[in-house]
Amino acid sequence: MIAINQLHPLFAAEITGLDVSAPIPETVFSEIEAEFRRHSVLIFRDQPITDDHQVAFSERFGDLETTKVGTVGTGSKLIVLSNMDADGTVAPPSDRQVLNNRANRLWHADSSFKAVPAKASMLSARIIPAKGGDTQYISMRAVYAELPTRLKRAVEGKVVVHDYAYSRSKIDPNLVTDEERAAVPPVRQAMVIDHGSDLGRSLYLGAHAARVEGLPDDEGRALIDELMVFATQEHFVYAHKWRPHDLILWDNRAVIHRATPFESATEKRLMVRTTIAGDAPTLAAAA
Ligand code: OGA
Ligand code: MN
């Protein structure tokens, strides 16, 4: 029997009593899907899974994205977030992988820089540091619901340009290669996504959001900044302190997330992510 326990007043729930590496009957899986839709973030406890188990469970939710050029393991269904070298020793702070991990500390939605951005991501904790390295989430449905009328009007019908090169340049101007630039050109996303009459709307923003179409650059930037200041208020945040063998699934169209710092020069952290591809551009679900 699976048990569900909400972890934050607005969203995020933990699921216990389930082994995701074993076959899951369709009836149980539909229940999980319904809980996922409702809570946006699901934490599956006690899942000491292998890469193959993670891929298989992720694929129940849809086709997986493969890793883009310029990231470790290009073309694979797995993204490995690690601060270690191939031999397992901690890598220096200048390491490209470590810098890329730093970019995860900016609030973001995974793959929002793709024309059809990710539906969901699944992250499993393989090695966790003793201190720090939490992952934080914000319910962008809760944020939209609480937006003051003035901001609701300001976001209505807006299109935002999301740009990978823009977000990475905030970390280090030389982090993005020409090859990456060519592979992930800027894309247009709806600023507001409609999840249907039961769930309402969410704000779709994050680190890759560079410009607002139809507004001068500075005005668009100011609007994005104001919305992000509103969205990142503490009461919207669920901060996840990883326990060994936690597995988290989140809805990239309903939440944004970020990593928090840890002693990455001395402690090890190893996480493995799979990404469930979206099936339509956000503009198709624009409010
Ligand atoms: C990710 C991500 C955050 C973390 O895997 O997409 O942003 O805490 N991870 O590692
Ligand atoms: Mn991410």
Image: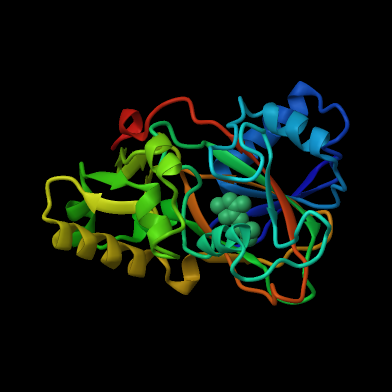
Quadrant of res 134: bottom right
Q: Is residue 171 visible?
A: yes
Q: Is residue 112 visible?
A: no
Left-right relation of 30 to 252: right
Q: Is the residue 5 above or below the residue 102 in the image?
A: above
* Quarter of the figure that contains the N terminus: top right
Residue 7 point in image, percent of width and height: 66, 61
Q: Is the residue 5 above or below the residue 114 in the image?
A: below
Comparing 151 with 76, the one in front is 76
* Quarter of the figure that contains the C terminus: top left
Which residue is at 44% across, 48% downward?
Answer: 177
Comparing 163 with 121, the one in front is 163
Comparing 30 with 189, the one in front is 189
Residue 63 point in image, percent of width and height: 61, 25
Farthest residue to the top: give it: 26
Left-right relation of 141 to 75: left
Q: How many numbered marks does the figure carry?
A: 0
Which residue is at 58% across, 45% downward?
Answer: 71
Which residue is at 45% across, 65% downward?
Answer: 171
Which residue is at 27% across, 60% downward?
Answer: 224
Residue 170 point in image, percent of width and height: 39, 64
Residue 120 point in image, percent of width and height: 57, 39
